[in-house]
Image (cartoon, coloured by chain):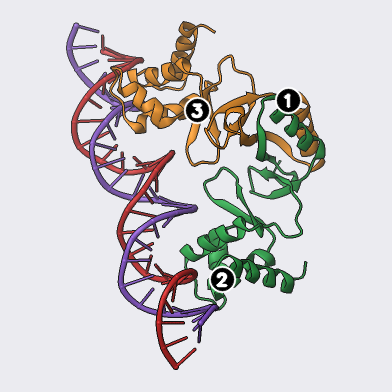
Chain colours: A orange, B green, C red, D purple
Amino acid sequence: MTNEKLLSDFKDVLKKEGLKVTPQRIAVLEEIIKDKGHRESEDIYMAIKSRKTHVSRATVYRTLDILVQNGFARKLNLGDGRARYETKIDSPHHDHIICNECGKIIEFVNDEIEKMQEEIAKQHHFKLQQHIHQLFGLCKECQ
Amino acid sequence: MTNEKLLSDFKDVLKKEGLKVTPQRIAVLEEIIKDKGHRESEDIYMAIKSRKTHVSRATVYRTLDILVQNGFARKLNLGDGRARYETKIDSPHHDHIICNECGKIIEFVNDEIEKMQEEIAKQHHFKLQQHIHQLFGLCKECQ
DNA sequence: TTATAAATGAGAATGATACTCAATTATAAA
DNA sequence: TTTATAATTGAGTATCATTCTCATTTATAA
C-alpha cells in the first residue's frame, strides 16, 4: 500500500469515527510507517518532537491506541513493561524471537503452530481470539 | 514431593546461599504450595497477613524472587501488568490459555510445538532459553 | 549470650501509561 | 470566510505494580 493511500485511509477512518485530522495524529502514523521496527512510544514521541511537529506523550499514546484499534498498528508486549508498536499494514501475522542479550527482535511465522493453537483451543472449548508466542534466547552474535 | 521435604529443601537452599530462614519466607513458600493456582503477589500478601504471620509487600516480592531464582516457583507475565506466580515443584513445563472475559487460566502442553520452537530458534541461529506462549479467547462459559 | 550481618517493613521512589482540565484547534454550518 | 462548538491537545498530576531506602529488628554462628 502506498503511503498516500494509507494516509487517506487513516483520514477516512478518523472522519468515520468523528475524530479530527490533526498534525499530531498524522505524525504518529508517519512514524509508524517510516520505521517498521518494534518501536516504543517514547521513541515515536522523541522522533516526532525532534522533527517539526509539537506533540506530547499523552497524544502519542492516544494516537497509538487509535491506530491499534483501527488495524493500522499492532501493540506488542515483550514482558519488559514497555509496549512496542509495529505497522500492521502489508504485514501479515507473525510472532517474535527476542535476544535476551542485545534485545534484537526477529519475526517468524509457522503455520503448523498456528493450526495447533486452534486445535488446543478447541480441545479446551475456547474460542481463540489472540495469542502471544515469543521465543527468548541468545542470537548468533550474543552467544 | 511432600511438603516437609519441600520445606527442608527450601531451608537448605537458604542456608546454602547465606540467607536466613524467617517466618515470612516460610509463609510465602507455604502459600505457593497451598494454592497451585496462578497467584498475584497481592493475593499471597493478603493470605499471609490474614492468617498469623506479619509480613510486608516488599518481603513477599523479595521472597517470590528467591523462590523463582531457585526453581521453587515460576513467574508468569499475562500481559496485564501484574505478575502471576505458580509452584514449579512437581509441575512440568506448560503454557497457558486465558479467558479474555472471566480470566480463567488453563494449562496446556504440546510437545510438537515445543519441538518446533527449537527448530525455529535453530533456523534463526538463536540459542533458545525460554518462551512465552499464551492463547487468549473465550472459555466455554463465556462464549 | 553475644556479636553481627541479614532481613524486615513503612514509606518513598520509580517508570510506563492514563487521566484532568483549561486552552487551543479542526470542522461543519451559516 | 466567519462563526460556533465539540474535539483535541499538552502540562502536569494520578495510578499502579513493583522496587528501593534505611532505621529497626532478628536469625544465627561462635
Residue B52, quarter of the rendered image: bottom right
Q: Which residue is mark 3?
A: A85
Residue B81 sits above or below residue A27 on the image:
below
State the SS at label 3: strand
Under mark 3, the amino acid is Tyr
For disc 2, the neighbor class at 10 Å (few under 14, some 14 to 19, many from 20) is many
Residue B6, quarter of the rendered image: bottom right
Q: Is residue B104 left or right of residue C13?
A: right
Residue at the spot x=53%, y=72% of the render? B49
Nearer the observer, A71 or A77: A77
State the SS at label 1: loop
Where is residue B114 drawn, in percent x and y?
76, 37
**Residue at mark 1 to residue at mark 2: CA–CA distance:** 44 Å
Q: Which residue is mark 1?
A: A110
Nearer the observer, B55 or B124: B124
Q: Are marks 1 and 2 in contact (CB under 8 Å)?
A: no
Where is residue B43 drawn, in percent x and y?
56, 62
Residue B69 sits above or below residue B5 on the image:
above
For disc 1, the neighbor class at 10 Å (few under 14, some 14 to 19, many from 20) is some
Under mark 2, the amino acid is Ile
Badge 1 and badge 3 both on one subunit: yes
**Residue at mark 1 to residue at mark 3: CA–CA distance:** 21 Å
Residue at the spot x=61%, y=30% of the render? A139
**Residue at mark 2 to residue at mark 3: CA–CA distance:** 39 Å
Residue A37 sits above or below residue A123 on the image:
above
Where is residue D29 drawn, in percent x and y?
54, 78
Of the residues under marks 1 and 3, which one precedes in the sequence?
Answer: 3
Disc sitting over residue B87 in the figure: none
Residue A32 sits above or below residue B47 on the image:
above
Under mark 1, the amino acid is Asn
Badge 1 and badge 2 both on one subunit: no
State the SS at label 2: helix
